[in-house]
Image: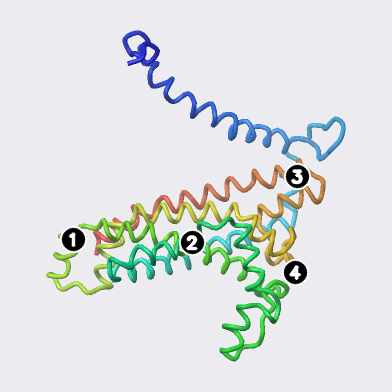
């Protein structure tokens, strides 16, 4: 052992030196920008020259900002829709892959993961072809053959947010299916066999056995998706050119922060919008963190 890391020479300091690089990088690339952002949100929007301290003024302005509350509502609708549909589809795909032949299970799982491996900007550019007016692939291959009226996904306020949701679902469903497939493969076969012997059907086994067993993985997927939804920027930026679409129907919190800071030339206001995301996100994550306890409690009661 190196003398520097020898606990006898430096009691308790060996672990500190091993962890030091992590905390140094954390301070440089996360804590420092965060602290600067907090200070920026308390200063005026002056871009050039000396800025003045305005305290909580930017945050008070948000309380009466209708566009901000529209962005909050859109972000929550986008997050709930994306997370619920993605997890549901991922569970279906994971169970389907579980029943596939082992030789093709790996290639199929990798194929489902490809959208999640693509850079979000590239994926958004591809979806311009999917949503582009009457000639978009979604209209030509799905909407028109089913006999429905053509939808202008990027201009109709009733469907703008749906377009962003579809894009996010396409990106993450396969990735979440892979994680859930790993969790399903890790289930105790003895517990499943015991449930079958007791006469439990597929749905009963899924609710009372499978869900409690995969609850930690399910919670990880939920947290991952929620954070990604609140950080969604590249997809909506490419689709709507930095705006929130018609009537702000697709305006998200991160997009609004960008508009405030770079389009409206108000970095203080933009920083306030960015930091206001923290309590909304934290609230949702606290609720999601309670999922395993709720599932285990319900499973044991039934």
Q: Residue at x 86, y 35 (%)?
A: 48
Secondary structure at badge 3 equals helix
Q: Residue 137 or 246: which is nearer the viewer?
A: 137
The circle drawn on residue 189 is 1
Instruction: Pick whichever of labels 2 and 4 is earlier in the sequence.
Output: 2
Q: Residue at x 65, y 56 (%)?
A: 234
Q: Residue at x 69, y 47 (%)?
A: 273
| Residue 97 image position (x, y, % from top left) | 34, 68
Q: Residue furthest right?
A: 49
Relative to 56, does residue 193 appear above or below in the rendering? below
Pointer 3 local density, CA inside 10 Å: few below 14, some 14–19, many at least 20: many
What is the spatial separation of the Cα atoms under label 1 and label 2, in whole angstroms? 30 Å
Left or right, 145 with reference to 8: right
Disc 3 and disc 4: Cα gap in Å? 23 Å
Among the two numbered marks 3 and 2 on one chain, the one whose residue lies closer to the N terminus: 2
Residue at the disc numbered 3: 269
Discs 3/4, front: 4
The type of colouring in the image is rainbow
Instruction: Tell me the number on the disc at residue 165.
Output: none
Mark earlier in primary sequence (3, 4):
4
Give the secondary structure at mark 1: helix
Residue that badge 2 annotates: 114
Q: CA distance from mark 1 to mark 4?
A: 52 Å
Q: Position of residue 153 (x, y in %)?
A: 67, 74
Q: Nearer the viewer, mark 3 or mark 2?
A: 2
């Amino acid at each position: 052992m190196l003398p520097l890391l020898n606990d006898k020479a430096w009691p308790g300091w060996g672990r500190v030196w091993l962890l030091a690089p992590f905390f140094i990088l954390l301070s440089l690339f996360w804590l420092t920008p965060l602290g600067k952002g907090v200070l920026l949100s308390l200063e005026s929007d002056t871009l050039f020259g000396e800025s003045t301290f305005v305290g909580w003024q930017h945050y008070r302005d948000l309380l009466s900002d209708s566009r901000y509350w529209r962005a909050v509502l859109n972000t929550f609708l986008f997050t709930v829709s994306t997370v619920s549909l993605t997890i549901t589809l991922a569970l279906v795909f994971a169970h389907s892959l579980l029943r596939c032949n082992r030789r093709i299970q790996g290639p199929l799982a990798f194929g489902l993961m490809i959208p999640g491996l693509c850079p979000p900007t590239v994926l958004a550019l591809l979806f311009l072809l999917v949503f582009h007016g009457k000639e978009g692939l979604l209209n030509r291959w799905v909407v028109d053959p089913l006999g429905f009226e053509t939808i202008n996904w990027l201009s109709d306020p009733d469907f703008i947010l749906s377009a962003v949701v579809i894009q996010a679902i396409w990106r993450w469903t396969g990735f979440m299916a892979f994680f859930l497939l790993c969790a399903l493969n890790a289930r105790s076969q003895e517990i499943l066999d015991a449930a079958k012997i007791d006469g439990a059907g597929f749905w009963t086994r899924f609710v009372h056995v499978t869900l409690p067993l995969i609850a930690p993985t399910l919670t990880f997927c939920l947290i991952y998706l929620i954070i990604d939804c609140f950080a969604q920027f590249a997809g909506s930026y490419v689709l709507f050119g930095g705006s929130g679409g018609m009537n702000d129907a697709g305006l998200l919190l991160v997009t609004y922060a960008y508009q405030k800071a770079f389009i409206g030339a108000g970095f203080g206001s933009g920083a306030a919008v960015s930091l206001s995301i923290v309590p909304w996100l934290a609230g949702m994550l606290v609720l999601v963190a309670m999922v395993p306890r709720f599932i285990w409690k319900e499973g044991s009661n039934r």
